[in-house]
Amino acid sequence: MSGWRLAALLLAVIAASPASADEALEQGKADFAKLCAPCHGVDAKGHGPEAAKLPKKPVDLTRITERYGRFPEDRVFATIAGLDMPEGHGTREMPVWGDVFVSEGVGQSTSVADALRASDDASRRIAGLMHYLETLQGAP
């Protein structure tokens, strides 16, 4: 299954989620502050305290819509989840948050049910981050 089709499938899972849009947005905002702001900055413009240590400057996440003409949900979701990095093509600077979220959710469990639940939770967190980023578009 291609990364884009998988992203569409994950978005469908999120849409069926019982969590409210407000809760998802708040989780996304909290995840951004904890996980993304160190590199992208609290204003998401790429000037976080860790940015200077990176070989490539983090992008300005407030200009995603400007760069693409619309907010590309599938592309943003795939980037956060790590679906857009072909295996065998080296590494990327940004952590693969999809893997991190699933690992946190599964913990030491070997249960398929726990893995599926962790995957759904990771998808919701990624969607929350994506929707939070969408609220930042055009920020001064």
Image (spheres, grey):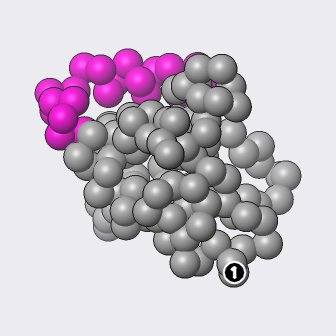
User: 107 above or below 61?
Assistant: below
Residue situated in front as seen by the camera: 6 or 11 = 11
User: 99 above or below 140?
Assistant: below
What type is the residue that disc 1 sits on?
Lys
> Magenta stretch: residue 81 in it?
no
State the image coordinates of residue 15 (x, y, percent, origin top left). 30, 20
Q: Quarter-wise, where is residue 110 in the image?
A: bottom left
Residue situated in front as seen by the camera: 15 or 39 = 39
Magenta residues: mostly which secondary structure? helix
Q: Residue at x 41, y 24 (%)?
A: 11
Residue situated in front as seen by the camera: 6 or 32 = 32
User: What residue sits right under mark 1 in the picture?
Assistant: 53
**Label 1 secondary element:** helix
Quadrant placement of the N terminus: top right
Identify the magenta region: 1-24
**Residue 63 left/right relative to 7:** right
> Magenta stretch: residue 16 in it?
yes
Residue 130 seen in the figure: no
Q: Residue at x 39, y 36 (%)?
A: 135
Q: Residue at x 46, y 57 (%)?
A: 43
Mark 1 Cα shell of 10 Å, populated few (<14), some (14-19), many (≥20): few
